Image (spheres, helix red, strand yellow):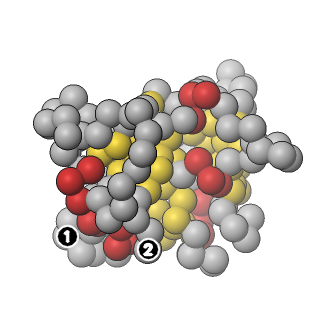
Amino acid sequence: MENSFGPNYASLEDTGFIAKYQASCFCGAVRYEVSADPVDAKICHCTTCQRLHGAPMQRAAIFHKRHVRFTSGSEHLVFYNSELNRPERILPCKVRCGKCGTPIADEGRRMWLAFPSLFDFGHPAVVPEAFRPTCHLFYGSRVIEIQDDLPKWSGHKNHSELL
């Protein structure tokens, strides 16, 4: 089933979709839910993520697009392809809310890299184990040292050198 965001995503009419987690931007205009745990979670230290997020690193939980369903506000999404320096939905691209500017996710060709800080894990927040990072990517570009036991890759996980 196709929805307003695209054919790779779950539709509001999909009766088999059972929401497991809900997420929203800061202002609440954009809301979505996922029906599964992330397939992986990572911390990226690449310079593109640093610049676009204004932070030393970016944390993402990775989902198959079929497990993502927008419940409101997909019309407020703004896209940016950093490779081509174009404000268009050319995959892969960055996704943010056009109303409040909150970074929502990185949209890949097949995957949705969600930012865990947008999920409602209750109060006080108890982040599920599946959302905890399994590694650091592009650690050679780090601006701060991270003291943890996670593998630190020079590039992509399993496709680069461990540092």
Q: Nearer the viewer, mark 2 or mark 1?
A: 2
How far apart are labels 2 and 1 at the CA level? 20 Å
Q: Which residue corresponds to mark 2?
A: 54
- The C terminus lies in which quarter of the figure? top left
* Element marked by disc 1: loop
- Residue sticking out furthest to the top: 16
Residue located 57% across and 35% down the image:
131
- Residue in the picture at 23% in, 59% down: 141
Q: Which mark is residue 84?
A: 1
Local crowd at mark 2 within 10 Å, few (<14), some, or many (≥20)?
few
The x and y percentages for residue 29 are 71, 66
Three-letter residue code for mark 1: Leu
Query: Can you give x and y, in whole percent of width and height, for residue 144 in the image?
Result: 36, 61
Q: Residue furthest right?
A: 123
Residue shown at the point (19%, 70%) measured from the top left: 84
Say which mark, if any, is on residue 24: none
In the rendered structure, the answer to whether residue 72 lies left or right of residue 78 reads right
Is 15 above or below relative to 156? above
Kindly identify the residue that appears in the image at 27 percent across and 65 percent down: 47
Q: Nearer the viewer, residue 4 or 9?
A: 9
